[in-house]
Image (cartoon, helix red, strand yellow):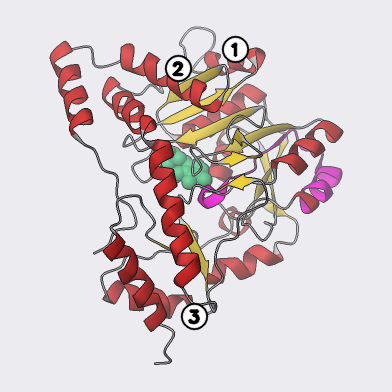
C-alpha cells in the first residue's frame, strides 16, 4: 500500500531518544526548551508553548482570549477539533462557508461579524493552504475581533512571505503523527504578543488558577526538534510532487489552486471529482491509500449556528486526498498518476 500518512524517523532521532533514556531527564528538560525556542524562531514570533495536542492548543488559546459565552467564527470545512475546542472553552461557534481554496470565505466572514459580533475568528489553513489572512486581518482591525490561526495542517506555509502561525494574534499547531512535523502527539500555541503569552501561560503552569497538566515529554520534543530542521526540505518535496500531479493528472479532476501570495505546503493533496467514491475504491484496490478529509461539515456535525455554506456542501461530496508525503519515490508518484489516468476510462 502507498500510504497517505507516513511519518519517518532516522538515525538522528534514534540517537536523541536513546540519549534521553540514558540521561533519565525525560520531561521538562532541554529538548522541550530547545524545541519551543526553535519553533518560535522558525515562525518569527516571541513565544511558542508546547502542549499535548493541537486540540488542547486551540482550547487554551481560546481560554486565554476569554471566549465564555462569546461567539467564535469557524469555517465549515476542517477537522472537528476546530469547533469542539470552541465548545470546550465555553464559546458559541458560528460557521461560515469556505472560498474556492477550502479556507474561510472573508466576504461571508464580514456578514457573520456584522450579524454576530464575535470575539474570536479561527481561520484554518486547511490542507496546508494559507487562508486569506490579508482580508481576515483587515476585518479584524475594522471590527476588533481576535484572530486565532488553526495552523495544525500548515507548518512552514507562508502568506506574502510570512509564516502562517505568525499572522494572527495567536496560533495553534498540531504535531500528531500525520502532520508535516510529526512527534506522535503534541501541540504549540504561538504568539508575538507578550500580554496574550502571559494569559496562555496561566493555563500551562500550575498555580495561578486551576489548570491541566498539558505537557509533552522530552521524547516528543526531540522528535519535533529534529523533524523541524528538515521541514523546509520536506515541504519542498511535497510541492514538487504536487506540481507533477497538476501537470500529469487529467483535467476532469479539480486540482488544489494556490492562493496568490501563498506558499502552500501540501499537508494533503486534495482533488475534487463527482465520482469520488468510485475513484477511492479504484485507488485502494490498486494499493493506493486515498481518503476523504472531511466527510462532514462542522455546522452539520455539531448542529451549530451557521450562514449558508453552499460551496462547502458541494466540496464535501467531491473532495478526496491522495498521498503526497515527502518519502514517495518517483516510481510511486508515477503509479499514482497512471492509476488516476486509468480511472478516467468509463467502467
Ligand atoms: C485543522 C486541525 N485542527 C486541529 C487539529 C487537532 O490536533 P490534534 O489531533 O493534535 O489534537 C487537527 C489535527 O488533527 C487539525 O487537522
- Name the residue at 53% across, 14% down: 201
- Image quadrant occupied by the C terminus: bottom left
On the rendered structure, is 5 left or right of 160?
left
Look at discs 2 and 1 and give the one toward the viewer.
2
Comparing 250 with 214, the one in front is 250
**Is residue 48 visible in the rendered structure shown here?**
yes
Look at discs 3 and 2 and give the one toward the viewer.
2
266, above or below 220, in the image: below
93, above or below 288, in the image: above
Asked if the residue at tag 3 contacts the one at tag 1, i.e. Cβ–Cβ closer than 8 Å, the answer is: no
Kindly identify which residue carries mark 3: 275
Q: CA distance from mark 1 to mark 3?
A: 50 Å
**Mark 1 CB in 8 Å range of ligand 1?**
no
How many marks overall?
Answer: 3
Counting residues from the N terminus, which is met first, the one under dot 3 or under dot 2?
A: 2
Residue 184 in percent (x, y) is at 31, 37
Residue 176 in percent (x, y) is at 37, 40
Kindly identify which residue carries mark 2: 37
- Name the residue at 51% across, 52% down: 127
The local secondary structure at tag 3 comes to: loop
Circle 2 packing at 10 Å, graded few (<14), some (14-19), many (20+), is some
Q: CA distance from mark 3 to mark 2?
A: 46 Å
- Name the residue at 35% across, 38% down: 182
- Name the residue at 36% across, 18% down: 32
Amino acid at each position: 500500500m502507498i500510504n497517505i500518512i507516513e511519518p519517518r524517523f532516522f538515525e538522528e532521532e534514534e540517537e536523541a531518544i536513546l540519549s534521553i533514556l540514558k540521561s533519565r531527564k525525560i520531561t521538562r528538560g532541554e529538548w522541550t526548551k530547545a524545541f519551543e525556542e526553535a519553533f518560535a524562531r522558525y515562525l518569527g514570533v516571541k513565544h511558542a508553548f508546547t502542549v499535548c495536542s493541537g486540540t488542547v492548543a486551540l482550547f487554551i488559546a481560546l481560554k486565554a482570549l476569554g471566549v465564555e459565552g462569546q461567539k467564535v467564527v469557524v469555517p465549515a470545512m476542517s477537522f472537528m477539533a476546530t469547533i469542539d475546542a470552541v465548545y470546550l472553552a465555553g464559546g458559541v461557534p458560528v460557521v461560515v462557508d469556505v472560498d474556492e481554496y477550502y479556507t474561510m470565505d472573508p466576504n461571508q466572514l464580514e456578514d457573520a461579524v456584522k450579524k454576530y459580533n464575535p470575539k474570536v475568528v479561527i481561520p484554518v489553513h486547511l490542507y496546508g493552504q494559507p487562508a486569506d489572512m490579508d482580508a481576515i486581518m483587515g476585518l479584524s482591525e475594522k471590527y476588533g475581533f481576535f484572530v486565532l490561526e488553526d495552523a495544525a495542517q500548515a507548518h512552514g506555509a507562508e502568506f506574502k512571505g510570512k509564516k502562517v502561525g505568525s499572522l494572527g494574534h495567536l496560533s495553534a499547531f498540531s504535531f500528531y503523527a500525520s502532520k508535516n512535523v510529526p512527534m506522535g502527539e503534541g501541540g504549540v500555541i504561538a504568539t508575538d504578543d507578550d500580554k496574550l503569552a502571559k494569559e496562555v501561560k496561566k493555563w500551562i503552569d500550575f498555580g495561578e488558577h486551576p489548570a491541566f497538566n498539558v505537557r509533552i515529554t522530552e521524547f516528543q520534543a526531540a522528535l519535533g526538534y529534529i523533524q523541524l530542521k528538515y521541514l523546509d526540505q520536506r515541504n519542498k518535496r511535497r510541492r514538487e510532487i504536487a506540481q507533477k500531479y497538476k501537470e500529469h493528472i487529467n483535467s476532469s479532476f479539480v486540482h488544489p489552486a494556490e492562493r496568490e501570495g501563498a506558499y502552500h505546503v501540501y499537508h494533503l493533496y486534495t482533488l475534487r471529482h463527482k465520482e469520488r467514491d468510485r475513484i477511492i475504491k479504484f485507488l485502494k484496490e490498486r494499493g493506493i491509500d486515498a481518503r476523504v478529509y472531511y466527510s462532514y461539515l462542522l455546522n452539520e456535525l455539531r448542529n451549530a449556528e451557521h450562514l449558508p455554506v453552499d460551496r462547502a456542501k458541494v466540496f464535501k461530496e467531491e473532495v478526496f486526498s491522495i498521498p503526497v508525503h515527502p518519502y514517495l519515490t518517483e516510481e510511486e508518484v508515477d503509479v499514482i498518476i497512471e492509476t488516476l489516468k486509468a480511472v478516467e476510462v468509463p467502467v
